[in-house]
Image (cartoon, rainbow, N blue to C red):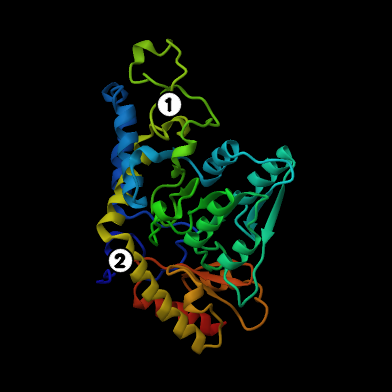
């Protein structure tokens, strides 16, 4: 597989900035910004915005998300955030009294709070699964999955340190006991392949402003077939059957648009955001997700080798995702690491005891040198 050459020319990242923080927020590519700007101009001439345009932009974005996720557009709902999609999942999954909901220890809050509330309503409990250093996340989860587990709500890689969760194994374990699998793929979709047909999640959500490289306030929700007749968390006019006919909107209907569209957010027909999604997805599809993952893995491998020579610690390659690298001090994390690096034009995130290094295709070898030099100064 050929690797992707540096794509910095497609972004407006200054030469003196080494931005290794895509897991925090990706910069918009120039073509994405152009698409957003062009579509924003539609609001200046609303007399040219036709009723059918409310649907055309939406369906183009839905298809774009499906192209990246490797699934059919009908199974995708448009959501503004991961928390919105997770709220839909929580509303539509049965949880009995005394049943458990499994999450990871120190999982991202959006995929914890909603399950705490749902468990309290149902009389269940939320269990945060930990793992030993010699044990994989998948093994730890599978060891806790039993007949009393209603939901396993996990990411594809841990947001704080990039450690991997093998969803193929976890999904199979869920199916053996009839537990639902809910995946927050915000920190992985777009940066590494996921085989939805093999994993078989009940719901899979991804906010798009990170590795999907789209504008903030956009995201996608995959809904498995058995849940597509479920209840949305809001009732808006455009998701109902026959909403294309503006003259008959007060002929109130109980049926919905087909597939997962009933779960779409309100006011989804926002051309600047939607066409930003399309432009970003087209760019990712052009590159190919497998090639993106392989290229980013090469970058994190090179960084890992150089920072280990400085005395920092990283996970073994088999335990980490291709696009996220956790770098740790031999002892406790000193105060002020993030600001100190930013003063040198190096941008990373500090999460717990980890410096989270998250490169993308706009990074070059000069960025890596700047990162290593800055870490040396620490």
Q: Tags 2 and 1 in contact by the CB under 8 Å rule?
A: no
Q: Position of residue 223 (x, y in %)?
A: 46, 41
Q: Secondary structure at mark 1?
A: helix
Residue 151 visible in the displayed image: yes
- Give the quadrant of residue 108: bottom right
Q: Separation of disc 2 and disc 1 at Cα?
A: 36 Å
Image quarter of residue 333: bottom right
**Relative horizontal placement of residue 157, taking residue 296 as reference (left or right):** right
Q: Where does the image place residue 100, in percent across and percent down from the top left?
A: 69, 50
Point out the tag, 2 or 1, that comes first from the N-terminus. Answer: 1
Examine the rendered structure and indicate whether residue 249 appears above or below residue 363.
above
Toward which corner of the image does residue 160 lie, by quadrant? bottom right
Quadrant for the C terminus, please. Answer: bottom right
364 to 245, vertically: above or below: below
Query: Residue at point 26% right, 24% down?
Result: 48
Quadrant (top left/top right/bottom left/bottom right) for the N terminus: bottom left
Q: Is residue 128 left or right of residue 108?
A: right
Q: Element type at marker 2? A: helix
Given residues 68 and 303, the one toward you in this image is 68
| Residue 65, horizontal then vertical, whole percent | 36, 46
Can you give x and y, in whole percent of width and height, for residue 76 in the image?
Answer: 40, 40
Instruction: Identify the disc placed on residue 239.
Output: 1
- The number of numbered badges drawn on the structure is 2
Q: Which residue position holds label 2?
A: 291
Q: Which of 343 and 77 lies nearest the eye of the viewer?
A: 77
Residue that appears at 27% across and 71% down = 3
Report the residue at 47% width, 64% height from top.
21
């Amino acid at each position: 597989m050929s690797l992707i050459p540096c794509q910095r020319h497609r972004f407006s990242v200054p030469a003196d900035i080494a931005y290794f923080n895509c897991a925090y927020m990706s910069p918009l590519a120039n073509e994405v910004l152009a698409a957003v700007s062009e579509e924003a101009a539609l609001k200046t001439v609303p007399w040219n915005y036709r009723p059918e345009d409310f649907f055309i932009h939406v369906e183009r974005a839905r298809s774009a998300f499906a192209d990246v996720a490797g699934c059919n557009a009908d199974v995708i709902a448009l959501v503004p955030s991961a928390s919105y999609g997770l709220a839909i999942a929580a509303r539509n999954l049965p949880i009995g009294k005394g049943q458990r909901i499994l999450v990871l220890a120190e999982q991202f809050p959006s995929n914890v709070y909603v399950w705490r509330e749902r468990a309290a309503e149902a009389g269940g409990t939320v269990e945060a699964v930990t793992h030993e250093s010699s044990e994989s996340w998948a093994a730890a989860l599978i060891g806790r999955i039993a007949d009393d587990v209603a939901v396993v709500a996990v990411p594809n890689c841990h947001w704080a340190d990039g450690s991997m969760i093998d969803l193929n194994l976890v999904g199979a374990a869920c199916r053996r006991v009839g537990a639902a699998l809910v995946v927050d793929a915000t920190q992985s979709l777009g940066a590494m392949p996921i085989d939805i047909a093999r994993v078989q999640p009940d719901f899979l959500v991804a906010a798009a402003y990170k590795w999907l490289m789209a504008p903030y306030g956009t995201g996608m929700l995959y809904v498995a077939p058995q849940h597509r007749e479920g209840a949305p968390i809001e009732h808006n006019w455009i998701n109902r059957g026959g909403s294309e006919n503006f003259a008959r909107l007060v002929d109130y209907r109980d049926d919905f648009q087909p597939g997962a569209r009933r779960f779409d957010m309100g006011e989804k027909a926002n051309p600047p955001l939607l066409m930003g999604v399309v432009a970003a997805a087209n760019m990712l599809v052009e590159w190919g997700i497998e090639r993106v993952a392989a290229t980013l893995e090469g970058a994190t491998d090179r960084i890992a080798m150089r920072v280990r020579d400085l005395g920092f610690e990283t996970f073994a390659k088999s335990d980490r995702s291709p696009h996220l690298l956790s770098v740790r001090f031999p002892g406790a994390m000193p105060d002020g690491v993030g600001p100190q690096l930013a003063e040198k034009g190096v941008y990373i995130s500090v999460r717990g005891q980890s410096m989270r290094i998250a490169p993308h295709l706009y990074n070059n070898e000069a960025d890596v040198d700047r990162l290593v030099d800055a870490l040396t100064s620490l």
